[in-house]
Image (spheres, rainbow, N blue to C red):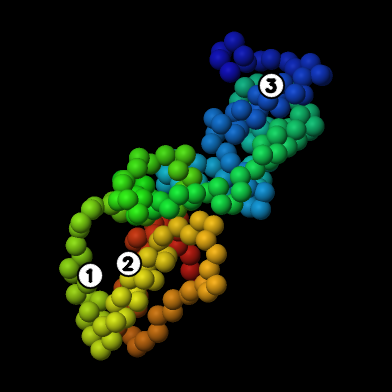
Amino acid sequence: FGDDAVCKVLPRNSQEHLRRILTVSAAELSGIKYIAELGAYEWDTRLQVWRQMPNDVFKGLPNRIADAHKWKNRSGAHIQSCLDAITSNPLRISGFNPHRLVGFANGDLDPATGQLHDISPANLLTSRLSVDWVPDVGCPTFLAWLQWMWARHPHQVELLRAAIRWTLEPKGDAKFGTEVVVGLIGPAGRGKGSLLEVFQALMGEGSVAGIA
């Protein structure tokens, strides 16, 4: 795709050639991965995670690449063959988050070893925390607040820690007999909203949703 490769006119029998060129551009240069059950994913360079690509954007990708390189003679069959090639070798859903890594702003942490890996599309993470990983850091203010909030039920602090870990740690292919949903119930002014703000700050803007 250098300067000498623009303004080409493809012969009628060049479908395989076009398919291969478009497939390389779409799947490798643009960072596209396809999951049969969910559709196409692309690497988000701002959030540094894999994000689901809208279906209409995915289907229009071969045409935009062909436009950019001024390929004049292409049919719907050419474009469809490109999409077929991209989708013919899909990842399994478990292909994402394959390692027990937690994405932080400054790297991808393996909680089992404590090793912080460089951020890379190859780690196949679909979520990332908005804060840095700092080893051996304490949270005295937050812990004191939790102890105040649950002064009458101190064991709830450990339950909350378990819930936070459950939320943040990748599950991979693990199968669980019981899936857990944490509900915060109590009178106003006891910290429910503040606790949710902590969760939201940890998870980052792309990993939080609300029900209106």
- Which of marks 1 and 3 precedes in the sequence? 3
Q: Which corner quadrant of the image does residue 157 belong to? A: bottom left
Gap in angstroms between the C-alphas marked 3 and 1: 59 Å
User: Which SS class for mark 1?
Assistant: helix
Q: Is residue 92 left or right of residue 76?
A: left
The residue pinned by badge 3 equals 71
User: Is label 2 in contact with label 1 (beta carbons under 8 Å)?
Assistant: yes
Q: Residue 28 or 109: which is nearer the viewer? A: 109
Instruction: Please name the residue that numbered disc 2 is placed on.
Output: 198
Secondary structure beneath dot 3 equals: loop
The mark that comes first in sequence, 3 or 2, is: 3
**Mark number displayed over residue 142:** 1
Q: Is residue 192 above or below residue 59?
A: below
Residue shown at the point (45%, 62%) measured from the top left: 208
Q: Which residue is drawn at 30% across and 51% down?
A: 114
Query: Viewed as shown, does residue 46 lie left or right of 84?
Result: left
Q: Please state which amino acid type lies under the numbered disc 1.
A: Phe
Foreground tag (2 vs 1): 1
Please say whether residue 131 is visible from this viewpoint: yes
Q: Position of residue 77 (x, y in %)?
A: 80, 32
Q: How crowded is mark 2: few (under 14 residues within 10 Å), some or many (20 or more)?
A: few
How many numbered discs?
A: 3
Q: Badge 3: how crowded within 10 Å, few (<14), some, or many (20+)?
A: some
Of the pair 171 and 6, the residue shown nearer to us = 171
